[in-house]
Image (cartoon, rainbow, N blue to C red):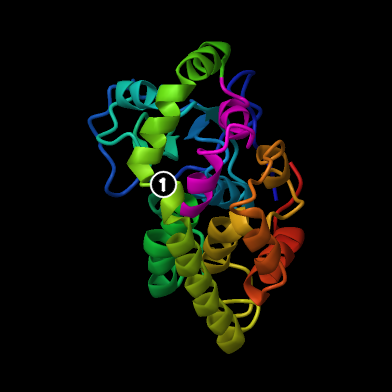
């Protein structure tokens, strides 16, 4: 496997495999086509959706550069590329077309072993709940360190803007995700139910959700559940370094740590997430 994460800079070392344009993504991008351009993955670095795309590209041996964007200012960068939405991750392909969203990026990589029903629940229910729950605690605690984690790896201009506008940005993020501290008891209960569900899935299917080899469904589950499992494996270990969990979350994260689901996530990272 060829691990390939590089922050945006430096010459290309080899061309990426030829693949067709991303299905469902805009073809009238403002980016000039260039078949020799190295693939560029735009991310919000600590995002579990971005980690899903990053891991799939690495697992498939696809070489790319990663450009880490700051929340808020990311929207202008993404729009300038011609994307119809501002969500991340976004993959800029060699022909100038765009592939937006971790699900479409996984489609484009051709990674096998998917389970649409399980992946849909993880993408649309479990992962958003985890994000809402964790940010409800982190954004409301000035000592959580989340600002620096979100800005780490971004360029100096974006990092400066992010620090200067943090009070406003923090409120905008909380409003956009409905990540309110008063909702934490209910959010924690909902996350607990999602863990109950996935515990049952593992009890029925074993370590591999589809077939006998690590595949798309396994990668999707492991990456989207990683913020709760906190695997000590790169890049997740470095991307989350510096977070100080507030008292509103720490006891629940500790209590969940030994659940079958989160033990499974850590095993998947140890076995299948090669060091960068």
Q: Is residue 202 above or below residue 192?
A: below
Q: Which residue is mark 1?
A: 180
Compared to 50, does 216 lie above or below? Answer: below
Magenta span contains residue 149: yes
Residue situated in front as seen by the camera: 190 or 65:
190
Q: Identify the residue at image location x=71%, y=63%.
A: 266
Which quadrant does the C terminus fall into? top right
Residue 139, given in percent of the width and then of the height, sits at 51, 38
Crowding at dot 1, Cα within 10 Å, few <14 / some 14-19 / many 20+, comes out as some
In terms of secondary structure, where does tag 1 sit?
loop
- Residue 108: tell me if it is visible: no
Between 159 and 249, the one lying in front of the other is 249
Q: Is residue 123 above or below residue 212?
A: above
Instruction: Examine the image and state in which quarter residue 119 appears.
Output: bottom left
Q: State the image coordinates of residue 177 (x, y, percent, origin top left).
A: 37, 45
* Residue 228 among magenta residues: no
How many discs appear? 1
Residue plotted at (62% across, 25% down): 153
Magenta span = 133-154
Whether residue 143 is visible to the viewer of this picture, yes or no, is yes
Q: What residue is at 49 percent from the left and 56 percent from the top? A: 130
Locate residue 189, reporting x and y percent.
48, 68
């Amino acid at each position: 496997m060829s691990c390939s994460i590089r922050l945006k800079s430096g010459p290309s070392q080899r061309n990426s495999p030829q693949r067709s344009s991303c299905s469902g993504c805009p073809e009238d991008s403002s980016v000039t086509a260039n078949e020799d351009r190295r693939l560029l993955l735009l991310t919000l670095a600590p995002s579990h959706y971005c980690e899903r795309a990053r891991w799939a590209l690495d697992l498939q041996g696809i070489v790319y550069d990663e450009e880490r964007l700051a929340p808020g200012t990311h929207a202008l960068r993404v729009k300038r590329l011609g994307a119809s939405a501002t969500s991340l991750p976004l993959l800029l392909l060699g022909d100038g077309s765009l592939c937006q969203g971790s699900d479409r990026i996984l489609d484009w990589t051709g990674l096998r072993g998917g389970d649409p029903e399980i992946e849909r629940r993880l993408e649309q229910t479990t992962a958003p709940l985890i994000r809402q729950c964790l940010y409800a605690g982190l954004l409301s605690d000035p000592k959580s360190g989340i600002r620096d984690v979100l800005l780490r790896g971004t360029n100096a201009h974006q990092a400066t803007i992010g620090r200067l506008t943090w009070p406003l940005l923090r409120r905008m993020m909380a409003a956009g995700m409905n990540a309110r501290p008063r909702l934490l008891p209910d959010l924690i209960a909902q996350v607990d139910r999602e863990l109950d569900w996935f515990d049952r899935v593992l009890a029925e299917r074993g370590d591999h959700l589809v077939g006998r080899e690590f595949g798309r469904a396994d990668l999707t589950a492991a990456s989207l559940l990683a913020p709760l499992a906190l695997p000590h494996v790169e890049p997740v270990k470095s991307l989350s370094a510096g977070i100080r969990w507030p008292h509103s979350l720490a006891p629940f994260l500790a209590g969940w740590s030994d659940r079958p689901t989160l033990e499974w996530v850590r095993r998947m990272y140890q076995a299948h997430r090669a060091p960068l």
